[in-house]
Amino acid sequence: MSRPLGITVSRHILDNQHLHPTATGDLSGLLIELIVAAKTINAEVNMAGLADILGMSGKTNIQGEMVQKLDDLANNTIKRRMARCGYICIMTSEEEEGVIPVVPGYEGKYTLAFDPLDGSSNIDVNVSIGTIFSIHRRRTQDGPGAISDLLLPGREQVAAGYIIYGSSTMLVFATGQGVQGFTLDPSVGEFYLSHPDIRIPEKSKYFSVNEGNTLYWEENMRRYVDYLKEEDKATDRPYSGRYIGSLVADFHRNLISGGIFLYPKDRKDPGKPGGKLRLLYEAAPLAFIVEEAGGRAITGDGREIRDVAPESLHQRVPLIIGSRHDVDMAEAFLLGRR
Ligand code: P6P
């Protein structure tokens, strides 16, 4: 029996490119190159349990965290492929302190910020992990990109997405026309459109937060989580807790089923007063996606994530993201309005 004719991600990208008469095909080409890198990473992640690439590489990254071999591999896979794709002029990665130049002569009009393998501490316990990417249009005119081409607010993103390496491997991205989800058919190595026009439920009954940090939170944050745990059938309370500790996995579940994820600022680590998660390649791309799906993403101190102007490549930011009603409610508590 012949397989149903699925829409491949390349077909979807090219079909949608035609919706933009001024499109040059550069963004399409960039996305298609990035997807090739993702397939390579997927193959290695799936092999990790079998090959001797589990465990530490013995190196530490910019964040001072022990780098796992798969982190290295994912980072290098994306870097090498995108450095000569011809569509970007500069990159930044969670794994590298400074900017990453592209091969001279291959400069393009976009920039790329990425977290090659977020949640990598979960690799050895077979928990879903993910790659996150954010694409901006450069502001400088030509030649090698500048760091200023990367330090742009999330509001200006032209595309963002993630690949989640889980029970199945999915690619989820947005380019301004809603959020599309594709599932990898490993037997043919193709991503097929499986979740067209994803919308996050307006309200949920799930919250994702590391309650081990409760004693480090501000009082308003504690009050909000206590509120979620009270019983009130009319408002679906108590909410259910769901926390995987892998941002892409927690975000993806909330995007599909509804929910709110919170990583607020806390007093746990004096080195991280502004939260743990990074703005450029974690919070901003996920904020783009969640807003395209009808949700909301805030810092909790009155700002939308996508309005935060980055001051440094690895800047951290508090992140409250998910179903719009729930984020609105959390913000009311965090700003002391409830
Ligand atoms: P905690 C994984 O290390 C990560 O960067 C994110 O993927 C995840 O959301 C967060 O940290 C988990 O942090 O402090 O709860 O272990």
Image (cartoon, rainbow, N blue to C red):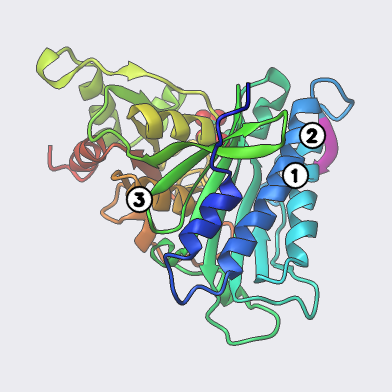
* Image side of residue 208 versus residue 269, left or right: left
In the rendered view, would you say 54 is above or below 58?
A: above
Q: Residue under circle 3?
A: 292
- Give the x, y percent position of residue 145: 65, 78
In the image, residue 156 sits, relative to residue 15, either above or below, namely below
Q: Which residue is mark 1?
A: 74
Question: Who is closer to the viewer here, 232 or 80?
Answer: 80
Label 2 secondary element: helix
Q: Quick one: SS at disc 1?
A: helix
User: Along the polypeptide, which appears first: circle 2 or circle 3?
Assistant: 2
Side of 203 relative to 14 (left or right): left
Which stretch did the figure color magenta? 56-61
Q: Earlier in the sequence, mark 1 or mark 2?
A: 2
| Residue receiving disc 2 | 44
Residue at the image point whose x is 23% and y is 35% from the top: 202
Identify the residue at the far bottom of this view.
141
Name the residue at 72% across, 34% down.
Answer: 188
Q: CA distance from mark 1 to mark 2?
A: 9 Å
Q: CA distance from mark 2 to mark 3?
A: 31 Å
Place of residue 105 in the rendered image (x, y in percent of width and height, measured from the top left): 78, 81
x and y percentages locating residue 282 in the rendered image: 52, 48
